[in-house]
Amino acid sequence: MTRLQLFLQCCSVESTAKAASVIAATLANGGVCPTTGHKLLSGEAVRNTLSLMHSCGMYDYSGQFAFKVLRASFEIQVSCNFPRSPKK
C-alpha cells in the first residue's frame, strides 16, 4: 500500500447520497434523526461536530470560508432593523 492509498483510506468514508443526507439532516435537526425521530446526538455533540466541520472541512480554504460566512452574517444583521436600546 502506498502512502497516498493509506491517506485516502484513512480520510475517506463510503456512504450513499441517501445516508449522507440523513446524517446532514440529523445535524441540522439538533441531533434528532428525521427518519426515526430518535435523539441520536446531544446538543453539545452537534455543536462540536458543526464547529469542526466549519473550521477543518475545507482544508486550506477553511479560513477564507469562515471569513466570508461571518462577513455575510454580519451584513445580514446590520441590514435588519433591530430595535435599538433607548439612550440613557
Image: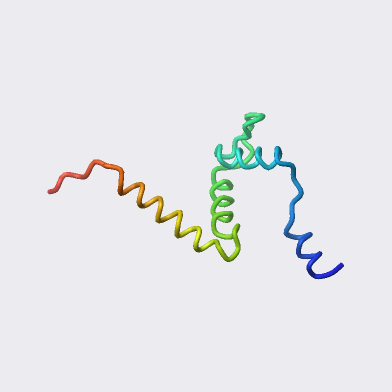
Farthest left residue in view: 88
Measured as percent of width and height from the top left, residue 18 is found at 70, 37
Q: Is residue 46 left or right of residue 76?
A: right
Return the residue nearer the eye: 15 or 42.
15
Measured as percent of width and height from the top left, residue 3 is found at 80, 70
Q: Is residue 83 left or right of residue 56?
A: left
Return the residue nearer the eye: 29 or 61.
61
Return the residue nearer the eye: 37 or 72.
72
Would you identify the image quadrant in which residue 52 lies? Answer: bottom right
The quadrant the N terminus occupies is bottom right
- In the image, residue 4 sits, relative to residue 84, either above or below, namely below
Residue at 74 percent of width and 56 percent of height: 12
Residue at 54 percent of width and 61 percent of height: 62
Farthest right residue in view: 1
Measured as percent of width and height from the top left, residue 43 is found at 54, 43
Q: Number of numbered discs present?
A: 0
User: How is colour applied across the structure in the image?
Assistant: rainbow
Residue at 64 percent of width and 38 percent of height: 40
Residue at 66 percent of width and 29 percent of height: 36
Measured as percent of width and height from the top left, residue 76 is found at 36, 47
Farthest bottom residue in view: 3
- In the image, residue 43 sits, relative to residue 59, either above or below, namely above
- In the image, residue 49 sits, relative to residue 11, either above or below, namely above
